[in-house]
Amino acid sequence: MSTPELHHRDRCAIVGIGATDFSKNSGKTDLSLATQASLAALADAGLTAADVDGIIRCDMDNVRGNDLAHSLGIRDLDYLGENGPGGAAPCAMVGQAVGAILSGQATTVLVFRSLNGRSGRRFGQSPVEGARVGGAGSYDELFAPYGLLTPGQVFALMAQRHMVEFGTTPKQLGHIALACRARANANPAAQMHDRPLTMDDYLAARMISEPLRLFDFCLETDGACAVVVTAADRAADRPNPPVLIRAVAQGSLPDPQPGIQFPVLMRESITHLPAKVVAETLYRRAGLGPDDIDVAQIYDCFTITVLLQLEDWGFCKKGEGGQFVASGEIDLGGSVPINTGGGHMSEGYIHGMNHIVEGVRQIRGTSTSQVAGAEVCLVTSTPLPPGSALILRAA
C-alpha cells in the first residue's frame, strides 16, 4: 500500500455531481452550460463556489478555467489544470484532480465538460472545409486526402475488421444500441427517453459508414456535466454519500506512431483500443479485476467501441464480444450491465462526463436503472489514445 502507484487508492471521493439538460439546441453559451452544471454539482455536494480551490477542464472545451472561476465567483484558485483530448479526457481529468489533492495543491476540485456539440461544433463531422488538404499533421497528410475524414469512417474500419476476423454480425452490434436505448427509456433526462428501439428499427436504419448504421452512432449533444472531488477524509459530512475513487489510470497504445489520433491503418491490430493497456494498469492499481465489476459505464461513441472495450477490459475473450453482447450479459441482470443512464448513444454525448455522473448515481443507489447491490463501477474513457479510466466504489 505504500508504493507510489497505490498511493491514491480510495483516498479521494466524488462528493457532488451536476448536469444540464441534454438537447440538440441549448440556446445557451458553453460558459452558461458549464456554470449551470457546476452550480448543480456544488449544491449536490453541499458546497459553495468559495469552497473550490481547483478547476480542471478538457483541453477541447471552449470554456477556460479562469472564465468559469469568474462566472462562479471564485476568488482564490490554487490549481488550474486540463487534460485531453476529448473522449480520452474525463476519467483522466478526475485523476488529475486526485493528483492535485494528494499533492497538497488543492482541497476541493471542480471537474467539468461543456459543449454545444450539436448546435455548435459537431465533432462527428469532417474538419476538411476546402478542396485541398495537407500541412496539418500526420492524419491530415496520410488519411484525409483519401477520404478518411470522420470518426464514423474510422470506427467503421474497426468494425469491418472485427467482422472479417471474428464473424461479428450487424445484429450483434445492434444489441449494444438496444441495451443503451432500453436504459434511456427509463431515464427521463435522456434524449431518447420516450423513443423505444427494436432490432427491426435498428437493422432498417440508413447506413452511415458501412457497417455502421444510424443507431450505431452517438448523439451529438448540447450540454454540460460536472463533478466535485475532494479528499475522502473530508467527504463524510457531505449531504450525499461520498463515492470513493478506488483507482485511476491513463495510457496509450505501444504503436510505432502513437501520435496519430486515429492510427487505424498504422496499428498492428485495429481491433484493439487503448483500453487493453489502461485496463492492465487500472486493475493492478485497484487490486480488482473484471469479475469484481458490478456495473460499467463504457465509452460508446459507436457500438463497435463498446464491443472492443468489453473484450479489452476482460469481460469476454478477444473475438467473442459479439456473442457476449447478444447473450444479454450487458443488460440489467447480466454479468456487467452497461451505460445505465442510456450512454452516449441514447442519453447524451458529453464526451464521457455523463458516464462519470451516472457511475456515481449507481454507487449511491439512485440510478433510474439501478443495479441491485452495485458497489463497484468501472467508467472508461478509452476510445482513442491516450485513454483513461477509473473505478468507483462505495465508501
Image (cartoon, rainbow, N blue to C red):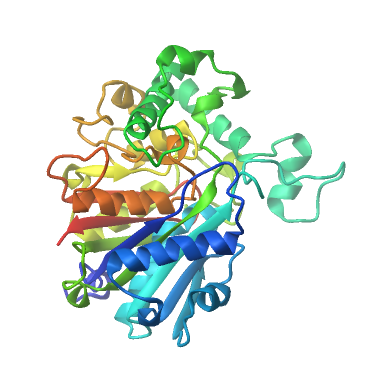
Residue at 40%, 22% in the rendered image: 196
- The x, y position of residue 162, in whole percent, is 46, 27
Residue at 44%, 60% in the rendered image: 37
Residue 254 visible in image? no
Which residue is at the front of the view, 12 or 239?
239
Dividing the picture into quarters, in which one does residue 324 lie?
A: top left
Q: Is residue 318 left or right of residue 371?
A: right
Q: Is residue 160 left or right of residue 241?
A: right
Seen in the picture, residue 290 relative to 353 is either above or below; the reply is: above
Which residue is at the front of the view, 308 or 225?
225
Residue 378 visible in image? yes
Which residue is at the front of the view, 140 or 392?
392
Residue at 34%, 60% in the rendered image: 17
Dividing the picture into quarters, in which one does residue 242 lie?
A: bottom left
Dividing the picture into quarters, in which one does residue 391 lie?
A: bottom left
Residue at 70%, 52% in the rendered image: 138
Which residue is at the front of the view, 199 or 248?
199
Seen in the picture, residue 384 relative to 318 is either above or below; the reply is: below
Q: Is residue 112 left or right of residue 29?
A: left
- The x, y position of residue 195, in whole percent, is 43, 25
- The x, y position of residue 298, in whole percent, is 37, 43
Q: Is residue 354 left or right of residue 73?
A: left
